[in-house]
Amino acid sequence: MRYWKDDAAFEVPCPKCGHSVELFKDEMSGRCSKCNHRFKNPKADFECATWCAYAEECLGFAPPRDAAANIGGGALTGRLLQAVKEQCESDPARVTHAMVVFQHAKHLVSAEGGDPRVVFAAALLLEIELLRAANETSGDTWDPARARETLEEIGLDTDVIERVCQTTASFLSGTTLETPEFRIVSDAHRLADLGVANLNSDSKGLDKDVLDGLKTETAKARARSLFS
């Protein structure tokens, strides 16, 4: 921040009520103090990601040093992670779990394919929904409209949002969706849960049922490497 210029801070009108909201260029989103509407920062600038050694830790993955045009992918990931941190701030363990899920998802999507936007968004949206479910005392809490609003604020397009919601709904209902994105999201969460169970158990290792529960060969190999 020591190298920022005067234009690093600016005011933009709230897209819902028009009230002026002050933002900094490295903020993923802003919240209107008048109507409480959250919206993505229209002037977000992550040019630093093209040279900073900590871009991967900050945004989720580092773009090529000579390709500033690819920053959008990292910025999208950053907005997803920021949404989890904000909506799960009451449960630090859930935020930590989300970071572990995200790391597993990155590894799996690089080997198994699938749309990274759907994988990362569904994997992280699930953390928000699972926290809501844990805090609810009355039945089913899955609200597609609420989920779509969250994903729209992050900046995903309509087609991706629908696929994310399908993946999330299938996971929460316990049904299987025959897509690579669903398999990766399911395995990423399973691997994160295995890590927690392994830490809290006196008996280390994996049994056959655990491995059979994983849907991709990459996840099975990762489980053997991490927990055997």
Image (spheres, rainbow, N blue to C red):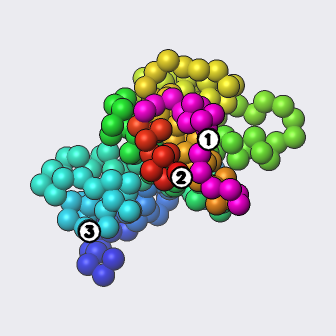
Task: Report the residue that reaches farthest toward the left.
Answer: 66
Considering only order in the chain, which callout, 1 or 3, is on the residue closer to the N terminus? Answer: 3
Give the labeled residue for mark 1.
207
Residue 61 showing in the rendered view = yes
Q: CA distance from mark 3 to mark 1?
A: 39 Å
**Residue 102 location, x and y as percent?**
47, 48
Q: Secondary structure at mark 1?
A: loop
Residue positioned 62% across, 41% down in the render:
207
Which amino acid type corresponds to the residue marked 3 in the rendered image? Answer: Ala
Residue 53: numbered disc: 3
**Residue 83 location, x and y as percent?**
54, 51
Q: How many marks?
A: 3
Do tag 3 and tag 1 residues touch (Cβ < 8 Å)? no
Give the labeled residue for mark 2.
227
Q: Secondary structure at mark 3?
A: loop
Is residue 215 one of those drawn in magenta? yes
**Residue 145 location, x and y as percent?**
63, 29
Residue positioned 59% across, 35% down in the render:
208
Residue positioned 69% across, 25% down in the render:
173
Instruction: Report whether 66 appears left or right of 135.
Output: left
**Residue 158 location, x and y as percent?**
44, 25
Considering only order in the chain, which callout, 1 or 2, is on the residue closer to the N terminus? Answer: 1
Q: Quadrant of the N terminus?
A: bottom left
Magenta stretch: give its range.
201-217
The residue nearer to you, when weighing 58 against 87, is 58
Q: CA distance from mark 2 to mark 3?
A: 30 Å
Q: Nearer the viewer, mark 3 or mark 1?
A: 1
Q: Nearer the viewer, mark 2 or mark 3?
A: 2
Task: Report the residue that reaches farthest toward the right.
Answer: 137
Q: CA distance from mark 2 to mark 1?
A: 10 Å
